[in-house]
């Protein structure tokens, strides 16, 4: 990755704020689609997808994959809209600030957006480290420190440009390896008959549309994934980076590329669920590692090595996307440096800071009992759900008021999130679903109750017609008007 980044960035075309943060806004739809897919293939797509196929069979992988694909496809609608209204923008919170003329809404938005990038770092470190530790016996904290240094090393060079070009290489790697390893594992396990024997999972769920799975897992997952994609600055960063007239193709292509990964990997979960094969995890190993365990029990060491390498590659892709997204949030919404040199320096400081903080959180997770990758994934996606409705309304509804957004999001944070966490602790599916729906409902109700009286179709400001620098110099009374 260091070599690829160096070869791609050796001409120095990344030495401006526009290039470092949004790749000069001229990324094509093919490269953009690969980057969109790779940055969305988090550890859950690699590990939780196999875990759900193993535990819940076809029902589990259905309710994981379909919402994931939809969460990227929805950007085919949202990305052109934000580029139309804020063509020179960098982040979604920045857009919200200028759309609603509200510092307090801007600040409350920054929490879930920064938190999501923190979790992007934490989850990849936790999963990637667990993978290497499982296969090698190296202590997990040491592995996570090494992975942090590796990803930082190439991402610091040229920012989003480095992320996008390495995304292509990393996603291509997992496709090539998958085409070789998964059919080989299936053949050794016993072919299609061995796979079909695991379609019900170890929980024996016979229907893909089992109502219990749909209620306890499907609803929460669908809300969390769609909300998560909207709260993920890496998606908005690519919305600002891809050529404006190619945004729709890029996000649709990216969603298709993404969907193939969990669907193919689910085969390993079905094989592991086949009781005749006797595939089991070592004591104390998180169940999300069942796919790697399946490979290690069925195939020779070289196959395990190659498969683990592909997994590390794609986890690094999501990791570096999180670093780039956090840096764009820091530069555009917090530091706001005056020139390109200061902007790039500030972006690199932000990358180092978010990487160090994510490493600390990942180390802390090791000492929380009964807490694994799936629980971590649910919590940060539910935090993202607090802002999903106001965000969509801000792009399509001209009567949105900053007061409604502020109080709706605040109540969702203060009331909804603690209930959701408690519901997971006591393992009450009805409470989990209810708290997720409450978060969506309360943010919607407040946004509608505090709507303004602006005429339909009249934007609060014509922010798409002037650069941000000019808008920022406009007197406050004029911007409010």
Image (tube, rainbow, N blue to C red):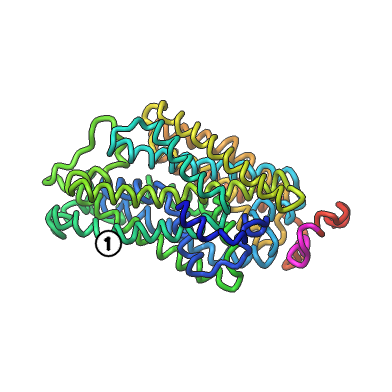
Q: Check the image and report above or below for 60 versus 82.
A: above
Q: Is residue 240 visible?
A: no
Position of residue 379 relative to residue 300, above or below, is above
Q: Nearer the viewer, residue 436 or 384?
A: 384
Residue 326 image offset from top left, x and y in percent: 59, 46
For the point 27% across and 61% down, the residue is 179
Identify the residue shown where x is 82% and y is 59%.
Answer: 470
Give the structural element (helix, strand or loop) at label 1: helix
Q: Quadrant of the C terminus?
A: bottom right
Query: In the depicted view, which residue is nearer to us: 438 or 458?
Result: 458
* Residue 188 sits in quarter: bottom left
* x, y percent for residue 312: 38, 47
Where are the magenta residues, as a range?
A: 460-469
Instruction: Examine the rendering and report whether any part of residue 222 can be seen.
Output: yes
Side (left or right) of 399 relative to 416: right
Residue, disc 1: 179
Q: In the image, is 468 to the left or to the right of 197? A: right
User: At which x and y percent is residue 283?
Assistant: 24, 30
- Tally of numbered discs: 1
């Amino acid at each position: 990755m260091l070599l690829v980044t160096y070869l791609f960035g050796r001409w120095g075309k990344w030495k401006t704020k526009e290039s470092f943060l949004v790749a000069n806004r001229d990324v094509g739809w093919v490269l953009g689609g690969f980057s969109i897919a790779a940055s969305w293939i988090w550890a859950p797509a690699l590990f939780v997808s196999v875990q759900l196929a193993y535990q819940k069979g076809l029902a589990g992988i259905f309710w994981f994959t379909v919402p994931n694909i939809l969460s990227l496809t929805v950007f085919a609608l949202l990305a052109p809209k934000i580029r139309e209204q804020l063509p020179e923008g960098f982040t979604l919170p920045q857009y919200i600030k200028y759309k609603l003329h509200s510092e307090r809404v801007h600040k409350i938005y920054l929490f879930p957006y920064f938190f999501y990038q923190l979790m992007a770092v934490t989850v990849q470190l936790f999963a990637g480290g667990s993978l290497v530790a499982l296969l090698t016996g190296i202590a997990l904290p040491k592995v996570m420190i090494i992975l942090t240094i590796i990803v930082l090393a190439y991402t610091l060079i040229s920012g989003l440009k480095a992320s996008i070009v390495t995304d292509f290489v990393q996603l291509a790697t997992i496709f090539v390896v998958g085409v070789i390893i998964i059919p080989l594992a299936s053949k050794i396990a016993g072919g299609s008959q061995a796979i079909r024997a695991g379609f019900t999972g170890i929980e024996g769920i016979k229907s893909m549309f089992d109502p219990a799975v749909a209620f306890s897992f499907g609803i929460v997952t669908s809300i969390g994934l769609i909300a998560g994609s909207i709260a993920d600055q890496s998606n908005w960063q690519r919305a600002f980076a891809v050529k404006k007239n190619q945004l729709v193709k890029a996000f649709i292509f990216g969603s298709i590329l993404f969907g193939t990964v969990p669907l193919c990997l689910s085969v390993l979960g079905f094989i592991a669920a086949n009781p005749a094969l006797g595939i089991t995890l070592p004591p104390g190993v998180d169940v999300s590692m069942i796919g790697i365990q399946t490979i290690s029990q069925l195939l020779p060491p070289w196959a395990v090595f190659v498969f683990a390498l592909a997994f590390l590659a794609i986890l690094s892709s999501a990791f570096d996307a999180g670093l780039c997204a956090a840096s764009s949030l820091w530069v555009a919404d917090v530091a706001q440096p005056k020139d390109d040199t200061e902007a790039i320096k500030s972006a690199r400081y932000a990358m180092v800071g978010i990487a160090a903080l994510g490493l600390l959180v990942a180390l802390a997770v090791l000492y929380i009992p009964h807490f694994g990758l799936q629980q971590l994934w649910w919590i940060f996606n539910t935090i993202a759900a607090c802002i999903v409705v106001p965000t969509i309304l801000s792009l399509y509804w001209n009567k949105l008021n900053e007061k409604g957004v502020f109080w709706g999001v605040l109540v969702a944070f203060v009331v909804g999130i603690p209930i959701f966490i408690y519901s997971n602790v006591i393992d009450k599916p009805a409470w989990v679903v209810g708290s997720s729906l409450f978060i969506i409902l309360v943010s919607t109700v407040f946004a509608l109750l505090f709507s303004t009286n602006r005429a339909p179709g009249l934007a609060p400001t014509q922010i798409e017609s002037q650069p941000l620098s000019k808008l920022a110099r406009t007197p406050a009374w004029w911007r409010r008007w």
